[in-house]
Image (spheres, rainbow, N blue to C red):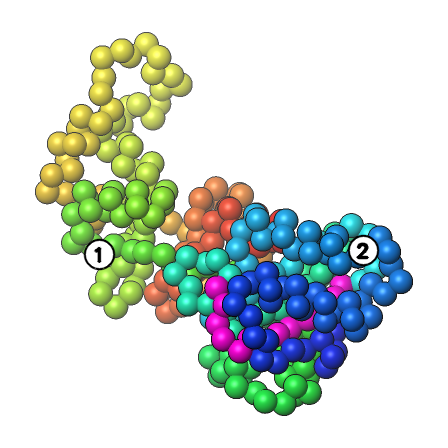
């Protein structure tokens, strides 16, 4: 992978209090070491604008103390990468995050978005390994740090998998959770579906908005092409009757998409686009470890 990266674009103990201070220092380090040298069409302001535009779409805190701010720039002659370890954690905007300790800033040609995707996936893979993560947090030798990035990220030829793009699960409910509490949780977290798990985290099923909406509707409604001729029917009357006393186990369904962490990007897209599942649960030994939905694929693959 042809990327502008070396020992000189590794920064240790960057002392900053907010993310844009971090990003601008990293960008300055890249340009000072020759990135885009002699290319007046891609000056500092144009590059920082590309990163700001991407950050405005979605935060790039990928979890595990790592952030991947990046930008795609039309006509950029090559891809540039700077990696910084911070003196103190800095918040990059992810809800509930305690801040990041390592930041990788990448500028890539707009025409080579696959490079950014591969690099992001390799970093996600690296930081999901607790031993490698702690090594990056604690390593004092900048040469070894750069060599580790080169070996584990830039020389990584493995395909993108579900593990690389999934996000951590937000919330789940137990089978004994009252239906009224289920809907409150879904509303609070703005979820179209919520997983049902047992005490040890095993995935049992899910509850979707579609299911809830259909609870009060007769089965024959699914055969109708229109209900415009029906004027005196309350679709939620029976729902409210069923809500009292109903538990998650009473309304959940086992009809859901699950994939192992090693599933390929093609398998992910097949479940979302061909089998038309709105959400995929990524599982390990039956336990839910991540979630992928259409908006996540847009964010981390198509619009990377």
View extreme (right): residue: 38
Asked if residue 225 is positioned above or below residue 34 in the image, the reply reads above
Of tags 2 and 1, which is closer to the observer? 2
Give whichever of discs 2 and 1 has the lower sequence position.
2
The picture places residue 161, in percent across and down from the top left corner, at 56, 63
Q: Which residue is mark 1?
A: 174
Q: Which quadrant does the N terminus fall into?
A: bottom right
Separation (CA) of disc 2 from disc 1: 53 Å
Q: Residue at x 47, y 54 (%)?
A: 292
Q: Residue at x 52, y 67 (%)?
A: 17
The picture places residue 49, in percent across and down from the top left corner, at 69, 51
Mark 1 neighbour density, 10 Å: few (under 14) some (14–19) many (20 or more): some
The picture places residue 268, in percent across and down from the top left corner, at 53, 54
Q: How many marks?
A: 2
Q: Which mark is residue 6?
A: none
Q: Nearer the viewer, residue 32 or 143?
A: 32
What span is in magenta?
79-91
Q: Residue at x 48, y 64 (%)?
A: 91
Q: Which residue is mark 2?
A: 42
Residue 285 painted magenta: no
Q: Secondary structure at mark 1?
A: loop
Left or right: 121, with 206 as reference point? right
Q: Secondary structure at mark 2?
A: helix
Left or right: 202, with 16 as reference point? left
CB-based contact (under 8 Å), mark 2 and mark 1: no
Q: Residue at x 63, y 64 (%)?
A: 23
Residue 120 seen in the current view: no
- Classified by dominant secondary structure, the portion drawn in magenta counts as strand
């Amino acid at each position: 992978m042809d990327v502008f990266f070396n020992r000189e674009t590794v920064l240790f103990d960057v002392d900053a209090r907010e993310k844009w201070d971090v990003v601008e220092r990293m960008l300055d380090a890249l340009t000072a070491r020759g990135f885009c040298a002699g290319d007046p069409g891609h000056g500092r302001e144009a590059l920082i604008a590309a990163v700001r535009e991407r950050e405005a779409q979605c935060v790039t805190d990928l979890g595990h103390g790592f952030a991947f701010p990046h930008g795609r720039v039309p006509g950029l002659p090559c891809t540039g990468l700077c990696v910084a370890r911070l003196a103190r954690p800095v918040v990059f905007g992810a809800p509930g995050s305690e801040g990041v300790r390592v930041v990788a800033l990448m500028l890539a040609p707009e025409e080579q978005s696959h490079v950014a995707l591969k690099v992001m996936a390799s970093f996600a893979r690296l930081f999901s390994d607790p031993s490698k993560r702690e090594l990056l947090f604690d390593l004092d030798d900048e040469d070894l740090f750069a060599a580790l990035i080169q070996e584990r990220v830039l020389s990584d030829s493995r395909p993108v998998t579900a593990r690389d793009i999934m996000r951590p699960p937000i919330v789940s409910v137990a089978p004994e959770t009252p239906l009224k509490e289920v809907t409150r949780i879904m509303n609070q977290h703005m979820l179209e579906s919520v997983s049902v798990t047992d005490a040890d985290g095993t995935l049992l099923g899910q509850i979707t908005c579609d299911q809830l909406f259909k609870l009060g509707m007769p089965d024959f409604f699914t055969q109708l092409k229109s209900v415009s001729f029906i004027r005196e029917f309350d679709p939620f009357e029976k729902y409210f009757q069923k809500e009292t006393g109903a538990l998650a186990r009473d309304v959940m369904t086992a009809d859901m998409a699950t994939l192992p962490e090693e599933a390929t990007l093609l398998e992910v897209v097949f479940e979302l686009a061909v089998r038309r599942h709105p959400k995929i649960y990524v599982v390990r030994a039956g336990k839910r470890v991540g979630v992928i939905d259409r908006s996540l694929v847009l964010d981390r693959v198509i619009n990377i």
